[in-house]
Image: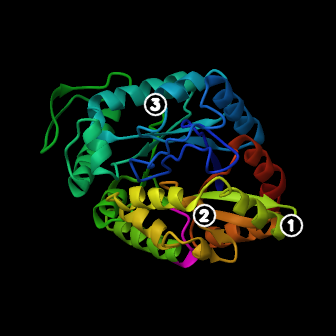
Amino acid sequence: MSAAFHWFLPTGGDARDLGGAAHGTGIGVGTGGSSTAPADRPASLGYLTQLAQAADQLGYEAVLTPTGAHCEDAWITTAALIAATRRLKFLVAFRPGLVEPALAAQTAATFQRLSGGRLLLNVVAGGSDAEQRGYGDRLDHDARYARAEEFLDVVRTAWRGAPYDHAGPHYRIEGGQLRQPPEPAPRVYFGGSSDPALAVAARHADTYLTWGEPVAQVAGKIARVRELAAAHGRSPRFGLRVHVLSRATAARAREDAEALLAGLDDAAIAAGQQRLRALESVGQRRMLDLHGGRRDRLWVTPHLWAGIGLVRGGAGTALVGSHREVADRLAEYRAAGVDEFVLSGYPHLEEAYTFAEHVRPLL
């Protein structure tokens, strides 16, 4: 099966540099450690429609919408874009602890019917105790993953359409039935680097998502999830969430990458690092460890740049280089087992065109 390429829908706003961008979640982390700086391009319905239509026309498979206090609600935003797009799918991020599973199953089924089968689900257990408490959720990190597993058990049961009861530690349902199941059932995307996250992914992820670490680290994580999933008789696909910045020459790409940091002084970076270090996410710590908060450690490899992770939660790395170099690096991840790529770049509209017109043809 050929690789799938998705793009990112910046529902927290967009910008030409990190000083003016709202910093949101990618996958697995419930918070993005959002900045208080206003976005240069607010997440208006007009701009998001323009970007979604561009992604549709450029041939991206889907757009990922984040979840968290920093951005607009993913369900409402993507529902507003159904009629404005033709074939584009919507990878909707949501937190299972903030909605009852029977209702979530019904919401997904409705979305699937109204969109003509264009819904994908990105289940985010949440990476910040503080932000979860802001939503009234007081479970800790490991307990949230246990609840997410039970949540998905109920959702998948409901999607079968038969009457059911459920009694578990987090949910109790009597006489449940989803009378109009989705057809097809949406694919479930799931991320996380902790042992509890990997256990849930092994049982429920149709596509396991991870952030843009060096190829060897990604390959090791893929091997681990594949082993765990095989014990349940499952064979998930694997996705990589990473930014891309390609130009006609590698020198120009590096210049433009460094320019993304132009509006950030040392105080802003220190504040961003303090905020992100407070998160409980194992995956977020892995992102932060790539650079240690230092400007002189941002080039993890010759083409993997960690500058975005100085202030942005979630996916903090970018593949930077000439169009050919970025294509070659993506091919290396593909050889390591990655089936899907969830890409982004600042600003998202322009970079969607750059990748589609210059890099994807090389793949």
Q: Is residue 184 above or below residue 261?
A: above
- Residue 304 spot, x, y in % from top left: 64, 70
Q: Does the CB distance between marks 3 and 1 fall below 8 Å?
A: no
**Residue 26 or residue 311, whichever sits in front:** 311
Residue type, numbered disc 3: Asp
Q: Secondary structure at mark 1?
A: loop
Residue under the image location 45 percent in, 71 percent down:
221
Circle 2: element type: helix
Q: How far is the residue under mark 3 from the one under mark 2?
A: 27 Å
Q: CA distance from mark 3 to mark 1?
A: 38 Å
Please, what is the three-letter code of the amino acid marked with disc 1? Thr
| Numbered mark located on residue 249 in the image | 1
Q: What amino acid is labelled 2 in the image?
A: Gly
The answer to whether any part of residue 85 appears in the image is no
Residue 139 x %, y %: 20, 48
Q: Which mark is drawn over residue 88? A: none
Comes first in the chain, label 3 or label 1: 3
User: Is 252 situated above or below 28?
Assistant: below
Neighbours of disc 2 within 10 Å: few (<14), some (14-19), many (20+): many
Q: Residue furthest right?
A: 248
Residue pointed to by mark 3: 73
- Residue 33 appears in the picture as rendered: yes
Q: Give the percent coordinates (x, y) of residue 30.
A: 38, 47
Mark 3 or 2, nearer chain start: 3
Residue 307, numbered label: 2
Asked if 357 appears above or below 102 in the picture, the reply is below
User: Depth-wise, is mark 3 or mark 2 nearer the camera?
Assistant: 2
- Specify the segment rendered in magenta: 211-216
Camera-nearest label, 2 or 1: 2
Q: Residue at x 28, y 38 (%)?
A: 134
